[in-house]
Amino acid sequence: MMTGDTMTPQTTTLQAIRRLAIIRQGLHQRPAHSSRETLLEIIRRTGLLQLDSVSVTARSHYLVMLSRAGLYDPAELDMLLADGHLFEYWAHAACMIPIEHYPYFEPWIRHKRETRTHFYRDMGSNPAETVEWVMKEIREQGALSSKEFESQRDGESGWWNWKPAKMALEYLFDHGYLMISHRVNFHRYYQLTEHVLEKHDFKLDYTLDDWQRWATMAGLRQQGSGTVADIADYYRLGKRTAEQNIMEMVRSGEVLPLQVEDMKTPMYIHRDDWPLLQEVEAGQHMPQVTTFLSPFDNLIWYRPRVEALFGFYYRIELYTPAPKRKYGYYVLPILHRDQLVGRIDPKIERKSRCFRIHALHLEPGTEVNDDLTAGMAAAVREFAAFHGCDTVEIDKSDDEDLKAAILQAV
C-alpha cells in the first residue's frame, strides 16, 4: 500500500518487478491481430525499435516485433517508415522511433549540429564541398541511397568517391539535415529533412532540458521500473542527468522510490504504474508468452539489468573467436512466461528452408515440464513459420527428452 510520503520507498518483490518489465514491454501476451496499426502501437509502447545488420536469422527489428506480435507480415513493418509513422535516428542505438516523438529529439539533433561542427574522417580533401555536392544531388534527384553515389565514382580517388559521399550522408543524417525516407532490402534512402517532415505539423520549440526530462520519463515508463542506470541507458542519457531528473520527479511526486527485495540499488516507478504493480503482486496479468528474444530486444539490451532482474548472464558472442564461445555465434535468450530459461544458437538455412538450432541450452535448475515443452514447441514452430522454413533440426540439447518432444510437436 502506498504511503503518504512520496520520498519513503515503496516495497515490492523482485518477481513483481520482473513481471512488470515484461508487461510494459508487451511481452506478456499477444495481440488479437497483427495489422499495421498493431505493429505501430507496439513500437509506441516500447518507444524504440533497434536496428542491426546481422542476418543469421531475420534482422533484429523483425525478431523484436515477432516476439510481441506473433506471426505478421514484415512488409507491414517496413511501410510504417515509408508512410511516415516512424523515423530513424540514434537513440539507444540506431533505432526506428514513433514520428510523434521527433519534436523531443529535435533539440538534441540541433545541439549536435551547433556543438559538433567538425567533419567526419574520410570525407575527402574538401569535406565542405563533398557535403554541398551530396545535398545538391538529393535536392535535385530526391531520395537516394549510398549505392547511387557508388555508381557515380570517378576512379578510386577524389572527393566524389563513394566513401567520402557515404560519410557525408552519415554526417548530414546525424546533424539533422537529412532523414531516412524508406528502406529497400535494408538499404537506407536519404531525403531532405524538410521533405520527410512536410506532412507533419510539428511545433519544434522544445529545449535540450525538455528532451532530457522527456527521455528520462520515457525510459522509466517503457521499462515499468528501473534503477537510475537502467533509466539512463534506455535513451543513452548521461547517468548524472537521469539522476537529477529522477530526483526532481521524486520530489514532485511523479516518481516513487522502490525498495526491491534482495536488491541494494534503489529503483523507481512512475506513480501511474504503481496500481499496475499492485495488480501484478496480486497475481494479475500473468505473462503467457514463450519466445526467442533478439540480442537487441529492448527487454534485455542493458545486460546489468538482465542479470539483476532475471539472474541471467548474457553476452552476444559473434565477435568472440569461435574456440572461445560458450554458447554460440548469435544466441537468442528464451523467455518463458516471466523467466529467461535458456538460449538457442539458431541458423536459418535459406536454401534448404530449414530452421536449425545448433544448440539448445537451459539455465541451471530449469524444470522441464509439460508447460515448458509446449511453450518451446510453439516458439520453434512460430519461428520456423516466420522464416519460411519447412523443417526444424536440433543438433544438440542440454535435455534430450525436451529436444525429442519439440521435434515431435513441430
Image (tube, rainbow, N blue to C red):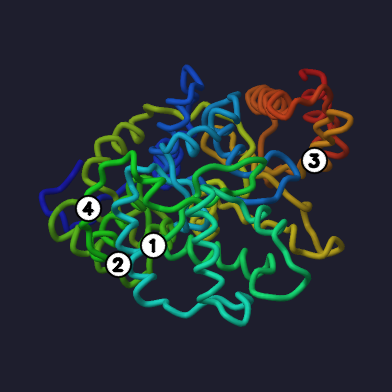
| Vertical position of residue 149 compared to residue 366: above or below | below
Between disc 2 and disc 1, whose residue precedes? 1
In the figure, residue 177 lies in which quadrant?
bottom left
Residue at left 73%, top 75%? 157
- Which dot marks residue 255? 4
Q: Do the residues labelled 3 and 2 touch (CB within 8 Å)?
A: no
Quick one: label 2, few (<14), some, or many (20+) residues within 10 Å?
A: some
Between disc 4 and disc 1, whose residue precedes? 1
Q: Are marks 2 and 1 in contact (CB under 8 Å)?
A: yes
Mark 1 residue type = Ala
Quick one: label 1, few (<14), some, or many (20+) residues within 10 Å?
A: many
Q: Are marks 4 and 1 in contact (CB under 8 Å)?
A: no
Residue at left 59%, top 29%? 75
Residue at left 72%, top 56%? 151
Between disc 1 and disc 3, whose residue precedes? 1
Q: How far apart are marks 4 and 1 (CA)?
A: 15 Å
In the figure, is residue 70 to the left or right of 234? right
Q: Name the residue under label 3.
A: 347
Q: Distance between the residues labelled 3 and 4?
A: 43 Å
Mark 1 element type: helix
Q: Do the residues labelled 4 and 2 touch (CB within 8 Å)?
A: no
- Which dot marks residue 243? 2
Q: How far apart are marks 1 and 3 (CA)?
A: 33 Å
In the figure, is residue 134 to the left or right of 148? left
Mark 4 residue type = Val
Q: Distance between the residues labelled 4 and 2?
A: 12 Å
Q: Mark 1 points at which residue?
A: 232
Q: Nearer the viewer, residue 88 or 260?
A: 88
Mark 4 element type: strand
Whether residue 15 appears in this view of the structure is no
Quick one: label 3, few (<14), some, or many (20+) residues within 10 Å?
A: some
Q: Distance between the residues labelled 3 and 2?
A: 41 Å
